[in-house]
Image (tube, grey):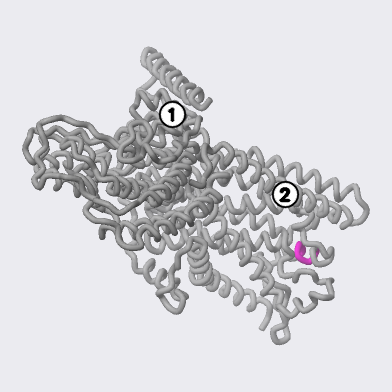
Amino acid sequence: MTDEKISQAEKDEAAYFAERAQAGAAAARSGTAASPEAHTLFDVQEMELNFGPQHPSTHGVLRLVLKVDGEKILEAKPDIGYLHRGTEKLFETETYPMGIPHTDRLDYVAAATNNHAFCLAVEKLLGVEIPRRAQLIRVILDELQRLSSHLVWLGTSGIDLGAVTPFWYAFREREQILDFFEEYCGARLTLNCMRIGGLPFDLTAGWTERVSEFLADLPARIDDYEQLLTDNRIWKKRTVGVGVISAEECVEWGLTGPIIRGSGLAWDLRRAQPYECYEELDFVVPTRQNGDTYDRYIVRVQEMRQSARILRQCLEKLEPGEIRGKVPRVIKPPAEEVYASIESPKGELGFYCVSNGTNKPYRMHVRPPSFINLQALPRLAKGHLVSDLVALIGTIDIVLGEVDR
Amino acid sequence: MSADVWTYVKVVLLVATVPAIVGFVIVLAERRIMAFMQVRLGPNRVGPQGTLQGLADLVKLVTKEDITPAKAEKAVHFLAPVLAVIPALTALAVIPFGPPVRIGKTMVPLWVADVNIGLLFLLAVTSIGVYGIILGGWSSNNKYSLLGGLRSAAQLVSYEVPMGLSLVSVLLMTRSLSLVAIVRRQEAMELWFIFPGLVAFFIYFVSGVAESNRNPFDLPEAESELVSGFNTEYSGVKFAFFFLGEYTAMIIISCVAVTVFLGGWLQPFPNVAALKFLGIVPPFVWFLGKVGAFIFCYIWFRSTFPRYRFDQLMALGWKWLIPMALANIVVVAFAILLTPGRTTGLVWLAWIFGGLFVAMFLLSKLRQKLTRRERLAAEPHPVEG
């Protein structure tokens, strides 16, 4: 339905410009027009609007160059690179274990999943077996990270649409999760919490109980956020039918994560290409059919509930055991190329690693979900209003550290 | 002292105290109440429980450098904040804060002027305030400010009309535009106009929130979209003026709502014997209390609602509020004309509207429950793992 509207809007624009061009040409022929644009009372002038890089709703240093007609967006061009730090090049200059802290700085609201994807790639090169306890703890850290990342998303995209209160509730829970991380590895954001072949530390005493307590509270807390937003008339008005994208288009653009699941395709790497011990865990991949901002919101909220479910199962399955696999002291993988990917909170996060047999990677390429999902923004934003653009940036859930690398 | 001198005293008092109340009481209350709703503390460092926060803000704003952008329209840029404040303060002149009180030998009324076109004067003067925002947005020579000013203009056009129309139905009940007469009429009828004017009250308050650019209609500022919109290029005292204008407009909307719909300074239930003790509270305090309740609603809205979109705001105004206000005028007119006496029709109307309100409230609760159940049924999983 809204797709039709958008394509209709595009047609209208095309017709409008064609008309103007014709009128201009006609005026030029008759020699009446002094300027190429004949100004009448109702003539529309386009305005170029610089949206960012210093803007409260671009979630970092994203810059968008907008062509607007009043508030209607005719064209949105993302201009990225303000946070480029050459991370991929940095990987080449340092040994494999030294690469892990750099991954913390990619998607800095979800460091654990980055560590995980990097380690998986190197482990695939080495062919190391990960002990079961380490696998479970990795999944626990991943899912806690997914929860905290989705909480950040929930809070900030609420603020983007003017709903300030959910932000504080979401960040209250996120603080608790960060406390768990702090207790585990000493860091709250840049965790550096995984090692090639396993984990750096075992869990501290009482950690699992505290996480269980938190998980017992969580469903009620999520109900609280939903009460403020899900059935809220204004929230629905601002999100339903905004930024619709079909599953086919998602596949064409390479979009992953909640975006593709909001469009009706149950594509989740935890199910599609299970890694660690996701195979034996019981959870559902939530999907919705309409592919608009509201559905992506619902999908993420349901994912939070599913994460809690996964966490509960993992905590039950935890048994004492090794946390490190048999990894050589100096990591020198055979000269091979591998690609390993996981389902990060934002979508498919992959590391493509080329080894030349030395202790440093020859090339390390990151497939960042934020960067690839961001491509769809101009397509999503076209024909919407400036207010919707803010909602759309929120719904894609980008982290600029990952977009620019 | 003669009555004239008292007028000057009252003007000076109003102009001096209202900004102080805004700075010290309302802003602090807003921040503390919002903080309470958002599980945080709010300002509690300056003075006991943060009570001197207003003073700190004032010092900061006054000592801050006042910047005018190089390519701004200088004269208009200067004029805009003034235009935002002066009308708002002027409008306070016709608000009756209480019945006349005896000071010495003279009876001093607690209003500056009882104008016989009071309501009309209010509507006229407050709508000037919007020029401040539009001109401020335009003269800053900043695209975001321009969009903010544009939104404000659209908002004014859309919401001034339903607001006026909703007050028309009250005029039918009172047959007077004077605010003092409106309160006196409610006293005589023993009926606050919120009951027969429930629909009018709803329309008035929604338009009022939109007129004073507050959530969920704070589009001209829209922190997250337009980077505070029309006032982006304002700093220091000029910014403070805009701020003061906005909050004074809020006070005026609340004062008018209280005067017109909630019986102004009157105490509730004057004829219930068991509640006679309420009469001890001076009328002035009743008035302030009611205004405070409205201000609380503003704050409550701000921490609850997301923001409307520009086009949705216009649609709400034109497609819902204006037709509703027009229909309401017809209904009220018929109720007054077709029934004997002045109050019978209004009492009936009050019962009908009250019943409808309760029914709609229950229906909306039911609907909410049903949609929630439907949504939960559509979710693919049992939540417990």
Displayed quadrant of residue B341 = bottom right
Q: Name the amino acid type tagged 2.
A: Leu
Main secondary structure of the magenta stretch:
helix
Residue B284 location, x and y as percent?
68, 74
Is label 1 or label 2 in front?
1
Callout 1 and callout 2 share a chain: no
Left or right: where does residue B183 sit relative to residue A85? right
Under mark 1, the amino acid is Leu
Horizontal side of residue A220 vs B59, given as left or right: right
Q: Is residue A121 positioned above or below B177 on the image?
A: above
Residue A353 - label = none
Residue A5 to residue A288: above or below? above
Q: Secondary structure at mark 2?
A: helix
Position of the N terminus of chain B by quadrant: bottom right
List x then y, in percent, for residue A243.
45, 33
Q: Residue furthest bottom?
A: B104
Residue lying at the far front in this picture: please name it.
A320
Residue at 24%, 34% in the rendered image: A340
Q: Disc 1 sits on a residue from what chain?
A: A
What segment carries the magenta color? Answer: B181-185
Confirm whether the magenta stretch covers residue A278: no
* Local crowd size for mark 2, using a 10 Å CA cut-off: few (<14), some (14–19), many (≥20): few
Secondary-structure class at tag 1: loop
Dot 1: few (<14), some (14–19), or many (≥20) neighbours within 10 Å? many
Q: Where is residue B349 drawn, in percent x and y?
A: 83, 51
In this rendered view, identify the residue nearer to me: A148 or A323.
Answer: A323
> Is B282 in front, or is A379?
A379
Residue sitting at the far left: A358
Horizontal relation, residue A387 to residue B165: left or right: left
Which residue does the image show at 23% across and 39% down from the upper left? A120
Identify the subunit bearing mark 2: B
Residue at the disc numbered 1: A265
